[in-house]
Image (tube, grey):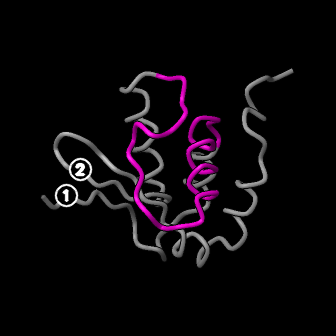
Amino acid sequence: MAGKNLVGPEVDALDLGAVFRALADEHRRSVMAQLAADRGDGERGCNSFDLPISKQTQTHHFRVLREAGLIDEVDYGNREGVRLRRADIEKRFPGLLALLETEPPGATASHG
């Protein structure tokens, strides 16, 4: 069964402010770092991410990332998948994914 694609803005409409606001949260940065490290453009299930937060909170974070144009979501009814918009991000913000990949896990978890 084909899923319903939930897509964000077109590549030329990606806004740096919206991207920065989306990446300001450590859990969203963690999702992006995990997707960037995968090196492929494959789809991952929403539950495949190592996030210590509720399902409802995860749903919120995925929506913020999609609305910022960083991921696309696919709704299959009984599950959802996410796909990194790697080519669009690299075209609009070259080097951003490489920066996310180098961030150590949990680097922002403790604020001094």
How far apart are the two marked residues, 1 and 2, measured between alpha carbons? 5 Å
Q: Viewed as shown, does residue 32 lie left or right of 53?
A: right
Q: Is residue 30 magenta?
A: yes
Given the current orientation, which residue lies at the most extreme left position?
Answer: 1
Q: Which residue is mark 2?
A: 75
- Relative to 34, is 59 above or below? above
At numbered mark 2, what does the secondary structure look like: helix, strand or loop?
strand
The residue shown at (38%, 46%) is 45
The percent coordinates of residue 92 (x first, y second) are 59, 75
Q: Is residue 94 left or right of residue 79?
A: right
Q: Which mark is residue 4?
A: 1
User: Is 103 on the left-hand or right-hand side of 22?
Assistant: right
Crowding around mark 1 (Cα neighbors within 10 Å: few <14, some 14 to 19, many 20+) is few
Quarter in which the C terminus is drawn: top right
Magenta stretch, residue numbers: 24-53
Please, what is the three-letter code of the amino acid marked with disc 1? Answer: Lys
